[in-house]
Image: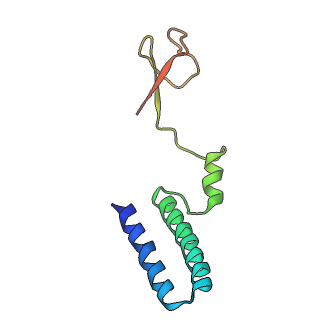
């Protein structure tokens, strides 16, 4: 539902700008507004996820920064819960993820 709301916001802004600004300039203004709203939405989304909203913190957590591992792995052979490459109980490398 939020996607439909944002599409409406983009469409409304583009209509208002196109009515009040002549053509070649309105296109540039609309593109700038769409890019600006995209940055705003991304920043708001990452803040909602617990990040600071800056791309550096997002990529820092993506490439070796602090991150929480809430995923548990279960051996598909014997069902043992573990976080290793191979099951410590039976040695199988087949595992499935669970929460």
x 43%, y 11%: residue = 78
Q: How many marks?
A: 0
How far across and how far down the image is residue 95, in percent? 49, 20
How far across and how far down the image is residue 89, in percent? 50, 11
How far across and how far down the image is residue 31, in percent? 58, 74
How far across and how far down the image is residue 18, in percent? 50, 84
Q: Quadrant of the C terminus?
A: top left
Up the image or down, 93 lies above or below 18; here it is above
Q: Residue furthest front?
A: 23
Q: Residue furthest top?
A: 90
x 36%, y 64%: residue = 4
Using the image as rendered, state which of residue 48 and residue 24 is in the foreground. Answer: 24
x 47%, y 88%: residue = 19
Q: Quadrant of the N terminus?
A: bottom left
Up the image or down, 71 lies above or below 85; here it is below
Using the image as rendered, state which of residue 92 and residue 38 is in the foreground. Answer: 38
Using the image as rendered, state which of residue 5 and residue 59 is in the foreground. Answer: 5
Q: In the visual, does 45 lie left or right of 61?
A: left
x 45%, y 73%: residue = 10
Q: In the visual, does 90 lie left or right of 62?
A: left
By what rule are the colours in the image chosen?
rainbow
Up the image or down, 94 lies above or below 72; here it is above
Q: Residue furthest left?
A: 1
């Amino acid at each position: 539902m939020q996607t439909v709301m944002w599409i409406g916001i983009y469409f409304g802004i583009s209509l208002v700008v196109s009515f009040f600004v002549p053509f070649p300039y309105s296109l540039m203004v609309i593109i700038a507004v769409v890019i600006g709203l995209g940055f705003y939405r991304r920043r708001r989304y990452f803040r909602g996820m617990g990040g600071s909203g800056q791309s550096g913190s997002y990529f820092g957590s993506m490439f070796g920064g602090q991150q929480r591992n809430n995923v548990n792995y279960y051996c598909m052979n014997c069902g043992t819960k573990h976080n290793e490459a191979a099951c410590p109980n039976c040695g199988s490398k087949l595992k499935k993820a669970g929460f």
